[in-house]
Image (spheres, coloured by chain):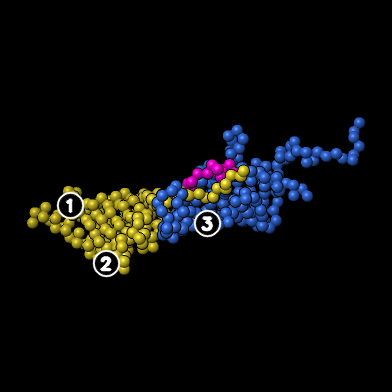
Amino acid sequence: MSSTHLRSGLTALLGLMACAALAQGGGSAGATNAPLASSAATIRQWGISLRDTVTGRVQLRFSSTEASPAPSDKGGLVPALWDVTGLKLESFRPDERSDFIIESPSCRVNVTTKDAGSVGSFTARRETDGISIRGYGFQFDGTERRLTVTNSVQIELRTRLFQSKPASP
Amino acid sequence: MIRSVLLPLLALFLTLAPGSVLAQQQDKILLSATNCVLELEKGVYHLWDHVRVESPGVLQITCDDLRAALPQDKASGTSGPLPTGGKLQSLIASGNVVIELFQPGANGSTNVVRAFGKQAEYGSQQEILILTGEPRIETASGVMIGTEALIYDLKSRTMRNRGSYRIELKADILKGSTLFNRSTNSPKSR
């Protein structure tokens, strides 16, 4: 078997693993199986949508420019675990309107537990009320919609602390 | 007697400037800290270690721990500069709380009122700021020290207290005052 065939085979296998992981998490995947020259275990334009098992509505959508399966502590590959580059994580409200969007240049995603985390930088924002967050070292719990930051965070709220009093005549 | 005169004097100092401050306030609040846990759906934010809350040009709060509630309005739309969703409902700052209120003074200067305490609590319903735990407020004219709580009403812009309090005024504030310039019965020196 030539190296090109081997790469195609490996990439297809990875795509299959992603689908298997999604089947566990109740999601659907869409990955472009374009192999990179540098590594056969990298998927470009990786993306997964996780849906509510009851309503079928999209809850979370992970997408990234590149993703590769992350090794476990024992050295083997874990189907649900991905090291991704250029993550965009979009969470949705029950009515499927966009809620928070979290972006990170590099992080690890667990599609089964719906978690994402990194020791590096990240940004988060919500368009509807203009909240924006940035910092270093984050862990996002997709089930609880909880964002934990461990190494510096800055939050900007587009709101007033106090309501202004109308000017007296 | 003297307290009844001096307390309104200090309260006047505290309450005169905020009118213009409120007019200037910006629709932006910056929170920063080393650590935080944000419950994005519930709108419950918990920050700790080197916490800073800043409303540019209006106030700054530093503390060890901060809990803020910004419940998300499910029905909030996307238009308008200040959506009802994301409105700060409550804020509890604790541990080495320092609040600095910036107030424009004469000739473009800025007066700073500083408040210190172990805990500060803000509720949007009543719009009051309650300072507890050896509360102390410092202004250019003096210091107000409470034993239990100092309460600043943001609606009426007035200060009140719970428990006893003490006011220490700087001597400068009485310069030129007619308060003590009274005639006495003592014979005039010749």
Figure colour of chain A? yellow
Q: Which residues are magenta?
A: B18-32
**Residue B171 locus on image (x, y percent):** 72, 40
Q: Considering the numbered disc 1 on the image, is that residue within a helix, a strand or a loop? A: loop
**Residue at image point 46% right, 54% down:** B84
Q: Considering the numbered disc 3 on the image, is that residue within a helix, a strand or a loop? A: strand
Which chain letter matches label 1? Answer: A
Q: Is residue B27 magenta?
A: yes
- Circle nearer the N terminus (2, 1): 2
Say which quarter of the image contains residue A99: bottom left
- How crowded pointer 3 is (Cα within 10 Å; few <14, some 14-19, many 20+) is rated as some
Q: Residue furthest top?
A: B190
Which chain letter matches label 2? Answer: A
Label ID, residue A24: 2
Q: Nearer the viewer, residue A101 or B187?
A: A101
Q: Disc 1 marks which residue?
A: A35
| Image position of A29 with respect to B185: above or below | below
Image-based side of A112 in relation to B178, left or right:
left
**Residue A77 locus on image (x, y percent):** 24, 61
Image-based side of B120 in relation to A15, left or right:
right
Callout in the foreground (2, 3): 3
Callout in the foreground (3, 1): 3
- How crowded pointer 1 is (Cα within 10 Å; few <14, some 14-19, many 20+) is rated as some
Three-letter residue code for mark 1: Pro
Q: Nearer the viewer, residue A168 or A34?
A: A168
Figure colour of chain B? blue
Q: Disc 3 marks which residue?
A: B90
Q: Nearer the viewer, residue A82 or A169?
A: A169
